Image (spheres, rainbow, N blue to C red):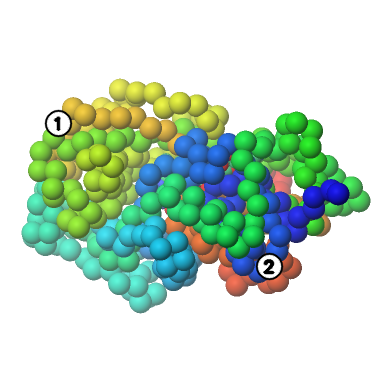
Amino acid sequence: MKERFGVVVVGGGIIGASAAYYLAQKGRTVLILDQYDVPNQLSASGDHLRAFRVSHGKDAFYSEMAMRSIPLWLDWNTQANDKLLVQNGFLELAVQTHGFEEQGLQVMKELKVRASKMDKDEVRRNYPMINTRAIKYAVFQPDGGTIWAWRTTGAIAALAQRRGAKLRSQMKVVSLVKEKGAIKGVKDSSGKLWQADAFLFSGGPWTPELLKSYRLPIKVTRQHQLYLRPPANRGRYRPEHFPVFACHAKGFYGFPLHIHGFLKIAEHKKGPPGKPGGAPEPNPAFEKKCRAFLKRFIPELASFTDSEASICHYDNTPDGDFIIDRLPDVSNGYVACGFAGRGFKFAPLIGKTLAELISGGKPELNLHRFRLGRFKGRG
Ligand SMILES: Cc1cc2nc3c(=O)[nH]c(=O)nc-3n(C[C@H](O)[C@H](O)[C@H](O)COP(=O)(O)OP(=O)(O)OC[C@H]3O[C@@H](n4cnc5c(N)ncnc54)[C@H](O)[C@@H]3O)c2cc1C
């Protein structure tokens, strides 16, 4: 007898895993297919940590999405019996007076989100490692903090399976088979056809290749990250004493100690174009940039000698908004991608929204900004 599912989810990163979890919760029979394991280190969801922040400058829409994600994250913590989101706070280092941080603070005030402005003295008292001569002030968001990324992806995929979802790893989808305005099935590299009533394509930075015929306007970039061991005063970089931080104007962000005495620092600015996958390699130019940033903002970290390189890929849309929509030519195909460098924090909300969309309901989240049709006519 042929196996047939309610929904086949292609791509078991955090977006696919989250959608599968909420679909299974709705009683749908779900199959997740992933070309590698779930989680895997080549995917955007396979790194140790991701940052959770509420503020998105003047863009209140994303701040609201972050706030709506928090209760869902806390529910995930409970369901998984783990601290997948740790709210150890998010600190923004402002180098100008009327910039992103000020706008974010205003939006958070309007949304009644907890956030406080810290003057230099307060920053010095709380975080003596920060060079306050380099900043004008800081904004602290107590609701922000650290997401344990690959642990979350694994936990949510496992919870989806506990609710009846099936997972097949090492199963690369290579083509879509369409019939009468619908997707009949997806073929894996061995030629097997996987059939379902509906299909979700959540292949992260591989999605443009997976859905080649749709010519998604996504540019994939290689993002370098650096793990380094503080040369001194390690204790004060523990999560109890040191929050996740970002200096938006300089494009850098970082985390407290989290693995074998290492902390992570990375640049949010888009890196060079690249193909997803591939092993990390040392990048002396990036290391030099990190050192220069640290020398100015957290000087005692700048003389690190123990470090390790890592890479991940952003799937960037032209306008920075995500893609969450039904595919235009079929009645039962959906796509969720373009989450670039900020999608993880919204994963529970996006998964829940996808489950509503695929189940034929009207999602609570307004998906207008995420329509595929907005790219029509762009070359
Ligand atoms: C360097 C970096 C830093 C980031 N920092 C943050 C942050 O601080 N805060 C935040 O909120 N977000 C952050 N993000 C964004 C966040 O990590 C991503 O938006 C999120 O992980 C994307 O999840 P995904 O499921 O869409 O993609 P992925 O995690 O890449 O998953 C896609 C999956 O699809 C599978 N797949 C692809 N093609 C096929 C195929 N043909 N057949 C079968 N399976 C397939 C892949 O194997 C993979 O497992 C960051 C991203 C990067 C790269």
Q: Residue at x 68, y 67 (%)?
A: 27
Q: Position of residue 219 (x, y in %)?
A: 56, 37
Quadrant hosting residue 171: top right
Bin the neighbour count of mark 1 within 10 Å (Cα to Cα): few under 14, some 14-19, many 20 and up.
some
Work out whether 19 lies above or below 32.
Answer: below
- Amino acid on which disc 2 is placed: Gly
Q: Which residue is mark 1?
A: 303
Alpha carbon separation for disc pair 1 and 2? 54 Å
Q: Residue at x 14, y 62 (%)?
A: 119
Work out whether 240 lies above or below 227.
Answer: below
Question: Which of these two is toward me, 302 or 102?
Answer: 302
Question: Which of these two is toward me, 294 or 356?
Answer: 356
Q: Which residue is mark 2?
A: 27
Q: Position of residue 359 (x, y in %)?
A: 71, 66
Q: Is residue 372 left or right of residue 302?
A: right
Q: Is residue 164 left or right of residue 135?
A: right
Q: Position of residue 232 (x, y in %)?
A: 10, 38
